[in-house]
Image: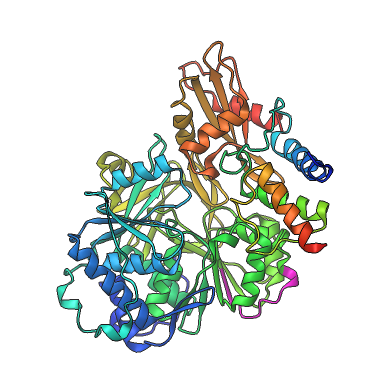
Amino acid sequence: MPEREKPKREKPEREKKDALLHHWLTATADALPNHPALIEDERVTTFADLLCQARSLACLFQQNGIQKGDRIALVMPKTTEAIVSLFSSLFAGAICVPIHPQWPKDRVEATLSDSGAKLVIDGDLPPPRITDLRTRTEIPWPQGRRPSTFANTEFPAIFPAMEARDPALMLFTSGSTGRPKGVVLSHRAIGAFASWSADQFEITSKDRIACPAPLSFDLSTLDIFNMALRGATCMIVPESIAWMPRFLVQWLSTSGATCWYSVPSLLGGMLHQGKLEERHCRNLRLILFAGEVFPGPHLARLRATVPHALLANLYGPTETNVVTYYEVPQDFDGAAPPPIGRACPYADVRVDPATGELLAGGESLMTGYWNRPDDTRRAFCELDGKTFYRTGDVVSVAPDGDYIFAGRLDRQVKRRGFRIELGEIEAAFSRSDDILDAAAVSFDDSARGTMIAAFLHLRPGCEMPIADAKAHCARLLPLYMVPDRIMFLEAIPKGSRGKTDYAALKKLAEDAK
Amino acid sequence: MTQQTMEIKAPVRQYIQEHFFGAAPPVPLNDAMPLITGGLIDSIGMIGLVAFIEERFKIEFKPKEVNTQSLDTVEKIEGLIRSKLEQRS
């Protein structure tokens, strides 16, 4: 597949292939010490300050026994302290494991134990709380360390030597058997996407990037690492407004953000309920979106609302980050959703001729699933001596060479950009003693997009109000995985070989609308 | 229960019943039942609920005034609406 032409330029040393993500921050802080790295409400953190805080926290990690390859979990919203903690983990040679703070407690605990994290950092308000999970003791957050108290040359020698293939992040994603899987991403894998996006979208220190996705979502690699690489400013979207389109639009128009990166659902909400058309977002020059299909008519409306901005659809599962992209033309008519486009230059993208499945390899490919060699083996395939990830996404190829998303090979669904394995919802129901059998299907609702229906076969004599069934789910699963509709059946329909007849259930769900 | 409490809670309850339980068998909606953290209303539903409240009671929330915790039960919603109405008068 041909790559889109882009003028080549000589890359500075720090952008070379084997650079480490935290070294990007060091180089940028040297070049632009007083430039804002993070803006969170009224609070501004300069590059010098961010670097100093990150190194000083990394030293604290080391004093508490953190060694290369250890895991440090962050269970907190995307705040200044969370981003400091992320870079501190990298300086200390650890793998940073961001976990969504709104996940139910049980799921957070299971994920902490699965990752084998030695430290967990949590708390919504500064200062965060650091807990040593080996001893269950608290470590005080280093307060009041200012850049002047540390010379920039004081630290590097004592931090572990790292290589670009070493893991940097572990991001957990829904698992079909009921347990989330940890996707391990190396410095090189994350760096491949970040440095390409910096070139492709000409990101500079004048940019202010807003990405409302939590740190546990791979979308956050764009703003965090373009900040470190190019000196762009991360405009932290307050978590308290991220759910409400009208507040987001108000925030966006006063923040001076130049780049935006989110799931299409949020942009759709900002257009429809947030009245984006009525606000001037003159500075906004770039809008990127990923994570789900953007309905054609909504995207056409966005195109007309911000004619001056470059709009691009980025595609790729967490396991590979972005591997294809499509720039939305001015005359986009909205008759169909946008294509997922062409391969990014660092990615090797193929189509399995037998199934139409998109196979993605190249520099951004994950190392594997944490502690799950069987799942990793199943997810990968070898072609021409190279490793590819089987995305499970079926694609077709347009006459002009763009890839077009055509569906899934399995039962994974996307809802408001969140990736959901229906099997994980079924596994959650099966943990109730009152439920003998459960099946979940997705269906489309013209007004509300992807919906999920669950069918439950209760133990004879049991009664379960819908509110109780939903509450059971909400105790075990993130809220975005709780089914919209719950229906009770005398038995779950099965095919001749005893397998659940999902087609019949889907029809039931659609007919019940 | 005061007249005003009734006037606030009843339409909120009715909206929730109609929009989130739909054709399903009636669920006794308890004023202390967690709506969001209990998995009954999702984030899209919340946006609709806030729009309904703003229109019905002629109020407009500002960013720091509402969040997913402050709307989690009918009781909390009622308190929030009442304080907005008091600010206005």
Residue located farthest toward the top when viewing the structure as drawn: A461
**Residue at the spot 36% in from the left edge and 77% down from the top edge:** A50
Q: Reply above or below: B18 against A333.
A: above
* Left/right of residue A204 with respect to residue A179 in the rendered view: right
Q: Position of residue A366 (x, y in %)?
A: 32, 55
* Left/right of residue A242 with respect to residue A152 in the rendered view: right
* Left/right of residue B17 with respect to residue A314 in the rendered view: right
Q: Reply above or below: A498 against A111.
A: above
**Residue at the spot 29% in from the left edge and 44% down from the top edge:** A113
Q: Which of A123 and A424 is in front in this view?
A: A123
Residue B39 shows in this picture: yes
* Left/right of residue A308 with respect to residue A134 in the rendered view: right
Main secondary structure type of the part rendered in magenta? loop
**Image quarter hosting the C terminus of chain A:** top right
Magenta region includes residue A282: yes
Which contiguous range is marked in magenta?
Answer: A277-287
Q: Where is residue A452 in the image (x, y as percent from the top left)?
A: 59, 37
Q: Where is residue B1 in the image (x, y as percent from the top left)?
A: 78, 38
Residue A17 shows in this picture: no
Magenta region includes residue A69: no
**Residue at the spot 34% in from the left edge and 72% down from the top edge:** A143
Q: Reply above or below: A179 against A68.
A: above
**Image quarter hosting the N terminus of chain A:** bottom left
Q: Which colour scheme is used?
A: rainbow
Q: How many numbered discs, if any?
A: 0
Q: Nearer the viewer, residue A403 or A29?
A: A29
Q: Nearer the viewer, residue A186 or B75?
A: B75
Residue B17 found in image quarter: top right
Q: Position of residue A357 (x, y in %)?
A: 44, 46
Residue located farthest toward the front when viewing the structure as drawn: B2
